[in-house]
Image: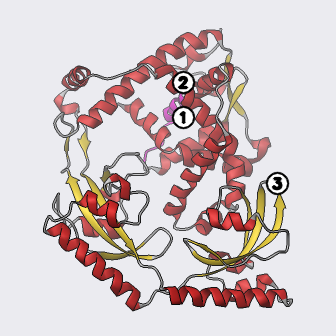
C-alpha cells in the first residue's frame, strides 16, 4: 500500500511538481544541479528528485530518505517510457500541449485566487511560466500516451473486483472519507442594455482622447477595472489561444500602436492597443470597464431563480431539464448540472475540495434536495444565482464493495495496469543503458535498473 501511496502522490502533484522543477532549475542554476541517472539518452536531474521530495514533505509527511529512492525509481520508469515513445515516434501536437497547460494553469489560478497572485508567487508572467514548462508537459504527454499504448488491452471484470476485495484482510481495508456529488443551475445577472451602452460610450470617449494624443497607459491606470491597470493596462506577451476569442480576434487585426473599437467579452467591455507582435505571440494593453449591475437587475434574476426553485420543489420539472433549459454555466448545463472534480475527473468531492461558501449550502441538504437560490459569483466575477442539488453523500466508512464499487474498479484496473507495465519494464530495461549515481546505488530495488 505504501508504494501505491507514493505513486499517487507523484501522479496527483505532477503538474505542480513540473512547475516547481522548472522554478528550482532556474534558481539553483546548472552549476549546483547534477545528473543522478541516465536512461538511454534521457537524464534525471537531482533538482527533479528534490522537488518531488519537497512536495512529499509539504503534504505533512515525515522525512524519509527511502522516499527519494521511490521517487527516483518512478522517474526511471517514466524515462524508460519516454525512451520507447521516441523509438515508436509517438508525438503530441502543439494544441494538445497548450490545452493541457491551459487546463493546469486554470486550476492553479483558482487555487492561488488570481492570475496575478500565481505570477507573483513564481516571479514570472503566465507567458513565461508556459514557455518554461511547455517542453516538460510535452514529455509528460508522450509518457502518458506510451503508457496507454502498453495497457490498451487491459480490462477489469466484476469477478476480478470481487476476488480483489475478498483478498484484502478486513483490518487492512482503508477508511474512505465522506464524499458528496452535486449539481448546480447557474443564472448569471447581466447588466441592462442601457448600462452596457453607457459603458460603450465611456470607452469611445477614452478612445477619442487617445487619438488626440493622451497616453493609453495613463488612461488605463486611471480608469481600467482590470488588475493590469497598475501596469498601464499591459498584459505581456501571450500566444494565440491564451485569451478569450473576442479579445484575440480584435487584437490580431491591429498594428503596433493602433487602438481597437469597443470589444465585448465575458469580462466586460474593452478597448485594446497593440504594443508588439512576434509571429503568433502578441503583447497588448487594454482598458476594461465592467457594466454595473443594479438592484433591479438582481431582482429580475432572483424572481426567475425563485420560480425555477418552486418548479423543482413541486416536482414539475427535473433538475436535468432545468439545467438544460435555464442554466448559463456551459461546463454543467448539458451534463444534468453535474459538477466535476477537476482534481480527479469524476463527480465525487471530499469536503475540503469544495469552495467553502458552496459547501456551506450543500451541507444543509439531504440527498435529493435542492437549495433555494443563492447569490454568489461566477468564475469571471459576475453575480449569479445558483441552485444546488445534493445528489449523494456518503459517511466515512471502511472500503466496501456495495458503496465503493467504482473505487474498487479503479484500484483493480490500476493494479492490473501496474503489473503489465512492470513486466514490460523488466523486459525493456535489459536492452537499454541505465546509469545511476553512486548516491542512489544503495537504494533497495534499484540494482535491477543498473546496466551490467
Q: Is residue 69 magenta?
A: yes
Quickly name the residue at label 2: 443
From the top left corner, tell me how far across and down residue 18 is, in percent: 61, 45
Mark identifier at residue 68 = 1
What residue did someone put label 3 on?
279
| Quadrant of the drawing holding the C terminus | top right
Q: In the picture, residue 153 is in which quadrant?
A: top left
Q: Residue at x 68, y 15 (%)?
A: 433
- Write down the region rendered in magenta: 61-75
User: What residue do we see at 59% from left, 36% from top?
Assistant: 141
**Residue 74: horizontal and vertical position, in percent?**
53, 29
Residue beneath the point at 22% across and 55% down:
391
Tell me the SS state at disc 3: loop
Magenta-colored segment: predominant secondary structure: helix
Point out the tag, 2 or 3, that comes first from the N-terminus: 3
Contact, mark 1 vs mark 3 (Cβ under 8 Å): no
Quadrant in which residue 14 is drawn: top right
Amino acid at each position: 500500500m505504501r508504494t501505491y501511496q507514493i505513486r499517487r502522490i507523484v501522479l496527483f502533484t505532477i503538474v505542480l511538481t513540473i512547475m516547481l522543477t522548472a522554478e528550482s532549475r532556474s534558481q539553483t542554476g546548472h552549476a549546483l544541479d547534477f545528473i543522478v541517472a541516465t536512461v538511454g539518452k534521457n537524464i534525471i536531474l537531482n533538482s527533479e528528485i528534490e522537488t518531488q521530495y519537497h512536495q512529499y514533505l509539504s503534504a505533512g509527511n515525515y522525512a524519509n530518505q527511502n522516499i527519494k529512492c521511490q521517487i527516483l525509481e518512478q522517474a526511471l520508469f517514466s524515462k524508460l517510457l519516454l525512451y520507447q515513445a521516441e523509438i515508436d515516434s509517438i508525438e503530441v501536437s502543439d494544441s494538445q500541449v497548450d490545452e493541457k497547460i491551459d487546463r493546469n494553469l486554470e486550476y492553479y489560478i483558482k487555487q492561488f485566487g488570481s492570475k496575478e497572485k500565481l505570477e507573483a508567487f513564481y516571479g514570472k508572467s503566465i507567458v513565461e511560466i508556459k514557455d518554461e514548462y511547455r517542453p516538460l508537459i510535452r514529455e509528460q504527454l508522450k509518457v502518458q500516451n506510451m503508457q496507454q499504448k502498453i495497457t490498451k488491452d487491459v480490462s477489469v471484470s466484476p469477478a476480478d473486483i470481487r476476488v480483489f476485495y475478498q483478498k484484502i484482510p478486513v483490518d487492512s481495508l482503508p477508511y474512505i472519507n465522506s464524499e458528496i456529488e452535486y449539481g448546480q443551475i447557474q443564472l448569471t445577472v447581466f447588466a441592462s442594455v442601457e448600462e452596457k451602452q453607457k459603458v460603450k460610450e465611456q470607452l469611445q470617449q477614452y478612445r477619442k482622447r487617445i487619438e488626440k494624443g493622451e497616453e493609453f497607459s495613463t488612461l488605463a491606470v486611471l480608469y481600467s477595472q482590470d488588475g493590469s491597470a497598475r501596469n498601464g493596462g499591459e498584459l505581456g506577451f501571450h500566444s494565440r489561444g491564451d485569451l478569450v476569442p473576442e479579445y484575440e480576434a480584435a487584437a490580431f487585426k491591429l498594428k503596433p500602436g493602433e487602438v481597437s473599437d469597443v470589444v465585448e467579452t465575458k469580462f466586460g467591455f474593452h478597448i485594446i492597443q497593440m504594443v508588439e507582435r512576434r509571429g503568433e505571440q502578441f503583447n497588448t494593453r487594454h482598458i476594461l470597464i465592467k457594466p454595473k449591475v443594479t438592484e433591479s437587475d438582481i431582482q429580475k434574476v432572483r424572481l426567475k431563480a425563485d420560480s425555477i426553485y418552486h418548479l423543482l420543489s413541486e416536482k414539475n420539472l427535473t433538475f436535468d431539464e432545468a439545467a438544460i433549459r435555464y442554466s448559463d454555466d456551459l461546463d454543467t448545463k448539458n451534463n444534468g448540472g453535474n459538477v466535476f472534480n477537476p482534481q480527479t475527473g469524476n463527480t465525487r468531492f471530499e469536503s475540503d475540495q469544495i469552495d467553502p461558501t458552496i459547501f456551506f449550502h450543500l451541507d444543509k441538504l439531504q440527498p435529493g434536495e435542492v437549495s433555494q437560490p443563492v447569490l454568489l459569483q461566477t468564475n469571471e466575477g459576475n453575480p449569479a444565482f445558483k441552485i444546488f442539488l445534493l445528489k449523494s453523500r456518503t459517511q466515512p466508512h471502511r472500503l466496501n464493495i456495495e458503496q465503493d464499487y467504482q473505487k474498487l474498479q479503479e484500484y483493480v484496473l490500476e493494479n492490473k495496469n501496474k503489473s503489465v507495465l512492470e513486466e514490460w519494464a523488466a523486459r525493456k530495461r535489459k536492452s537499454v543503458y541505465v546509469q545511476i549515481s553512486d548516491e542512489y546505488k544503495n537504494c533497495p530495488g534499484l540494482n535491477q535498473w543498473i546496466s551490467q
